[in-house]
Image (cartoon, rainbow, N blue to C red):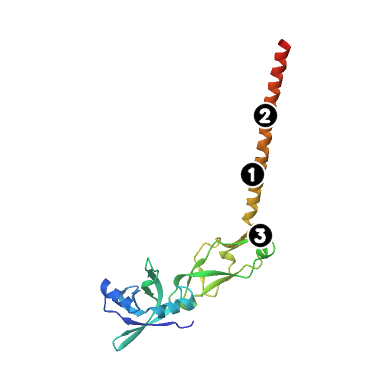
Amino acid sequence: MEEVILEAQRRQDIGTGKVNRLRKRALLPAVVYGEGKKSLSIQLVSKDLLHLMRVHKGESFVITLRIKDGAQSQDKSVLIKQIQHDPVSDEIVHIDFHEISLTKTIRVKVGLVATGEAVGVKQDGGILDHTMWELEIECLPTQIPESIEVDVSNLKIGDALHIKDLSLPQGVKVLSDPGATVLAVSMPTKEAVPAAEEALAGQAKAEPEVIKEKKEKAEGATGEAATKKEEKK
C-alpha cells in the first residue's frame, strides 16, 4: 500500500471567530477522533487535502497524518470520516478524521467502475443501467482497493451482473446483499414514443369519419322528412 502523508499541526484556536481566521489564511480546521481516545483538534493546508482527494478520487484511502505539536511530531493512520461544505460556495470548511489500526479490519465503501462496452449496447442499441455505484466491504486498511472494476463486455440485452458475480481482491469481504444488481442492459425506451404517437395519429384520423357519418345520417333524415311532406300535399 502506498503511504499517503498529510502534514498537519496541533490546533489551539477553537471557536467560530478563530476558526474563520484560519480559513482566511487558507488553513482548514479538522478534528481526529479515535475509539476510546480523546479527540484532537488540528489544522492543515487546504490545498494539500484537495490535492490528495484529486489524486486518489474518493474518501476511502488511508492517510498518515503527520501532526506537529511544537518540537514534537506524531503519526496517526486515519480515514476521512466526514467533510463539511459551505452551503453557498461548496468549499470545504471542516473535516473529521477517524483514527484506525492497520491490523484491524474496517468497513468502508468503494466505488464500482464499469469497464468495456456491453455487446447489447454496441450491437443492439441497448442501454447500460448502472444501478449500484459503490459497494460496502470489510478488509484491513492496507487492502482497501481504490475501486472495483466490473467488466460488462459480455452483457446482452436482458443480462445483469450481481454482487455475487464480481471478482474481488484478496482479503476483501462484501457486506452488501450478494443478489443485488450492479449493472444491467435493458431495451431502449425511446421505441415506446413512436408507438404512442402512432396511436394518437390513428385516433385523430378516426374522429372525422365519425363526424362525417353523423352528418350523412342527419342529411338523410332531412331528405326523408321532405319526401313525406310532398306525399301529404
The residue labelled by disc 1 is 200
The residue under the point 50% across, 64% down is 176
- 3 vs 2, front mark: 2
Seen from the viewer's position, the closer of residues 187 and 216 is 216
Q: Earlier in the sequence, mark 2 or mark 1?
A: 1
Question: Residue 52, located in which quarter of the rendered image?
Answer: bottom left
Q: Is residue 110 visible?
A: yes
Rate crowding at label 1 as few (under 14), some (14 to 19) or many (20 or more) other CA atoms within 10 Å: few
Q: Earlier in the sequence, mark 3 or mark 1?
A: 3
Q: SS at mark 2?
A: helix
Residue located beneath label 2 in the image: 215
Specify the amino acid type for callout 2: Lys
Tag 1: residue type? Leu
What is the distance, in whole Å, between disc 3 and disc 2 at their CAs? 52 Å
Q: Earlier in the sequence, mark 3 or mark 2?
A: 3
Q: Which residue is nearer to you in this view: 40 or 94? A: 94
Q: Is residue 15 visible?
A: no
